[in-house]
DNA sequence: CTGGGGACGGGGCCC
DNA sequence: TGGGCCCCGTCCCCA
């Protein structure tokens, strides 16, 4: 089993830098209780909502009706049918792993399809999703504003991941995050899946033995640039990470954390 | 216990 | 706007 699937632990004195909410989600998706959001697919009838639930439903998702206390604002592309942000009509979440290493796992531009987007909060119509989204902020704002905020300064909408509690202020950020759940980049050798193509490329080097990152001070080479960077610290007399109490330096943050945890630095 | 290597993930920047 | 890449960081294993 790949190490990345093992349960990870965190240093108690430091906030996890990432994955704070998705530790379990790689192997087991989360509970229905989280507000869900998903990227539109070719054959879903997307409902882009205002905060707190930006909900998109995949056709293969058996989701209950939106959990939001707010009536979802359906995009009503007309007259051509459901919103189609996907270029490949045959695409589905089940076919993603057959893609090209992840370059094109995301739905393509909708420009090729002419839609009119109606806001269900009012009678306005827009010719682009972005225009509608922008307009919808004006409906979203009052739901999030504190009383002190002026009405014309809407709070940015939240795009919720359907797999975990994370939320993002842009659809692009959400799409990138969702890749960490869908893992569209699959190693042809071992089948391990990754969220991004370059992660897969780095992984493939573990099969090929390629080590393109060479140390200029010794004969070692590394498959990963970060590992080379860490290695270079071992050639330095003064390491990058210094203990605040004893001035001892370490080549890695993790070593400094271990050092602190071992008791050099009383809780400060 | 410590130091180092291997593998990997996320945010941010650039194109 | 999205993909590629870099940087920083984490976690685990092993000597």
Image (cartoon, coloured by chain):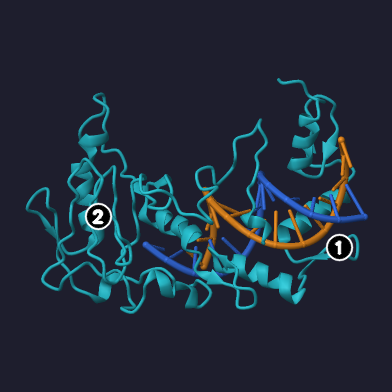
Chain colours: A cyan, B orange, C blue
Q: Is residue A152 visible?
A: no
Residue ranking furthest to the left? A123
Q: Which residue occupies the foreground of this view, A31 or A140?
A: A31
Q: Where residue A58 sits in the image (x, y, percent)?
A: 31, 64
Q: So how many labels did they put on this image?
A: 2
The quarter of the picture where the C terminus of chain A appears is: top right
Q: Residue A153: which numbered mark, if any? A: none
Please tell me which residue lies in front, A118 or A28. Answer: A28
Coordinates of residue A93 in the picture (x, y in percent): 40, 69
Between A79 and A29, the residue placed more toward the observer is A29
Direction from residue A85 to residue A29 in the image, left or right? right
Answer yes or no: is residue A237 visible: yes
Q: Quadrant of residue A45?
A: bottom left
Relative height, residue A178 to residue A95 (above, below): above
Say which residue label 1 marks: A216
Against A257, residue A91 (above or below) is below
Q: Residue at x 32, y 71 (%)?
A: A109
Q: Is residue A167 left or right of residue A115?
A: right
Q: Are marks 2 and 1 on the same chain?
A: yes
Q: Position of residue A40 (x, y in %)?
A: 31, 64
| Mark-to-mark CA distance, 2 and 1 | 52 Å
Q: Nearer the viewer, mark 2 or mark 1?
A: 2
Disc 2 on helix, strand or loop? loop
State whether residue A240 is above or below residue A43.
Answer: above
Q: Residue at x 29, y 53 (%)?
A: A55
Q: Secondary structure at mark 1?
A: loop
Q: Is A95 left, or right, of A211 in this rendering?
A: left
Identify the image quadrant of residue A251: top right
Numbered mark located on residue A48 in the image: 2
Pointer 2 or 1: first along the chain: 2
């Amino acid at each position: 089993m790949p190490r990345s699937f093992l349960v990870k632990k965190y240093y108690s004195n430091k906030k996890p830098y990432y994955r704070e909410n998705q530790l379990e989600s790689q192997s087991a998706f989360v509970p229905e209780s989280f507000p869900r959001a998903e990227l539109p697919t070719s054959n879903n009838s997307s409902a882009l909502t205002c905060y707190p639930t930006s909900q998109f439903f995949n056709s293969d998702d058996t989701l209950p009706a939106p959990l939001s206390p707010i009536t979802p604002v359906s995009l009503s592309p007309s007259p051509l049918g459901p919103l189609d942000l996907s270029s490949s009509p045959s695409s589905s979440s089940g076919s993603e792993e057959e893609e090209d290493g992840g370059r094109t796992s995301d739905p393509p531009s909708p420009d090729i399809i002419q839609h009119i987007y109606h806001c269900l909060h009012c009678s306005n119509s827009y010719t682009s999703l972005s225009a509608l989204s922008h307009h919808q902020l004006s409906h979203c704002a009052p739901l999030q504003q504190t009383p002190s905020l002026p009405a014309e300064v809407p709070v940015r909408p939240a795009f919720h991941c359907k797999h975990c509690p994370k939320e993002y202020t842009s659809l692009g950020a959400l799409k990138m995050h969702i890749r960490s759940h869908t893992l569209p980049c699959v190693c042809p050798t071992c089948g391990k899946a990754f969220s991004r193509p370059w992660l897969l490329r780095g992984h493939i080097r573990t099969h090929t033995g390629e080590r393109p990152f060479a140390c200029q001070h010794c004969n070692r080479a590394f498959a990963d640039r970060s590992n080379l960077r860490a290695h270079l610290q071992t050639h330095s007399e003064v390491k990058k990470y210094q203990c605040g109490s004893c001035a001892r330096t370490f080549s890695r943050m993790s070593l400094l954390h271990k050092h602190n945890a071992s008791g050099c630095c009383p809780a400060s």
